[in-house]
Amino acid sequence: MEYFTTTSKASRRAVDCVIVGIYERGKLGIGAENVDAASKGALKRLTKSGDLPAQAGSCTMLNGLTGVRAPRIAVVGLGKTSEYSAAKFVAATAAAVGAISQTKAKSVLNCLTLEPCDESSAYYLARHTAQAVADKLYRYTETKSDRKTKTSSLRQVGVALTRPGDAKKAKLGLKHGDAIGTGVSLAKELGNLPANVCTPSHLARTAQKLARDNAKLQTKILNEADMKRLGMHSLLSVGHGSDQASKLIVMHYKGASKQKPVVLVGKGVTFDTGGISLKPGAGMDEMKFDMCGAAGVIGTMATIAKLQLPINLNVVVPAVENMPSGRASKPGDIFTSMSGQTVEVLNTDAEGRLILCDALTYSRRFKPEAIIDVATLTGACVIALGHHRSGVMSRNPELASGIVAAGEAANDLAWQLPLDEEYGQTLKSNFADLANVGGRAAGAITAGCFLAKFTSGLNWAHMDIAGTAWTSGKQKGASGRPVPLLTEFLLDRCGALP
């Protein structure tokens, strides 16, 4: 996609489509006012007649307005003026791009960037525009018989600016947003692939391909024999019942010298039956999404590598398949983790923490400046926060608040949950150093407490994305989150934000 900035008026830019907005009660946005004036009141007449509804997210396509150079005008509802926000801007832009993608328009100008909102930065509005374009144009076709599914004609997207001096920041926002869109699309694709395609080996090949395409990026794959020699028996126990070999994917991006790396650890359970503690059949198809933590950190690495950021970043992905068989681990089995701590497996469906604990221990060798694990870890987090915010847990207030703030800026929201040591008391075991579950109460937090047992001395945070990694129902699919949040965190970390 090609991006540009302009201070041209909405009515004067020669593009195939212009996006303008209307608030409730017929109040025209800045771009809409210009189009209305040029077309001698056409928008106001249509608004009065009820042909241009202004409820948030609605979009009407107008063609051939006199006095306007663009042959199409996408008029999108912005809702109440008092409630207009960056989130409403993203939703409105996405609605407009979705409608435009059904036409033959090749170029579009987004004039919603002229509207004042709680995020008036030219950088972020441009970045959100590029991300919304990538999000709406993503199509999953990999396993369809007709892989030549109709794609959008859109090739050029511009953002309207009030001041020429905003162009530099807006162009940086478009560059960052385009790269984030690339990472989100990769994360979506990995999540959407069926589990018979996206196996641990497929994740490993994807990481290796990224390394081949970028000189600053290296990928190493540890096989089961390698992990056994390292004592990663907790991780290996999860894949005992599967015919798919478990992998540990280790990616190194070196964009700075003499700097401790940030490490992202992503849960990569490519399919989760629950093992011997078998899940109910209804909705089990969605357990192909249990590797979205892995997809998210790999997608983030793709974004950082594309931007060539001045930062050192390592990504560690424990990739396994959790299946029931005669070889599968059983409730009551005890395994020794890489850290030397023993774990009693009371529930084989609490497998994510079993692979993450060894991956976190392995990551100590990098002496990280900060380490964040990302996982579709608990249904309890969905109960606590729903599908809008990811859960964040850490015993470092500064790291936790930094992650939450990054989510606010990136419109990829998160919320901090407590991680008091008292919650971890339920993990006590009569037969091992700790059990892998602690009962129903505060399940998301006790899962975090389990991981905390392996992160002593580390600047560590845990993100539970079980409620945000995918959408269920008719529009089922991976969301690509939290690639925007993690990228924002890293952009800020290396001083790449304007």
Image (cartoon, rainbow, N blue to C red):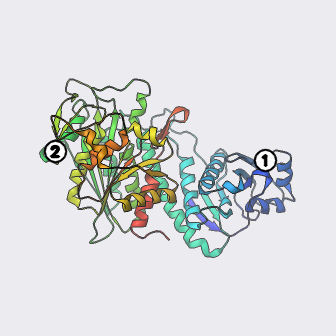
**41 or 8: nearer the viewer:** 41
- In the rendering, which numbered label is found on residue 341? 2
- Front residue of 78 and 399: 399
Marks 1 and 2 sit apart, C-alpha to C-alpha, by 64 Å
Taking the image as shown, residue 454 lies to the left or right of residue 389, namely left
Residue 76 horizontal/vertical position (percent) = 71, 50
- Write the residue at 61% across / 65% down: 120
Q: Residue 28: percent from the left, percent from the top? A: 77, 57
State which quarter of the image contains the N terminus. Answer: bottom right
Q: Tag 2, which secondary structure?
A: loop
Tag on residue 52? 1
Taking 422 as reference, is 143 left or right? right
Q: Residue at x 48, y 33 (%)?
A: 144
- Name the N-terminal-most of marks 1 and 2: 1
* Residue 20 in view of the camera: no
Tag 2: residue type? Gln
Q: Amino acid at mark 1?
A: Leu
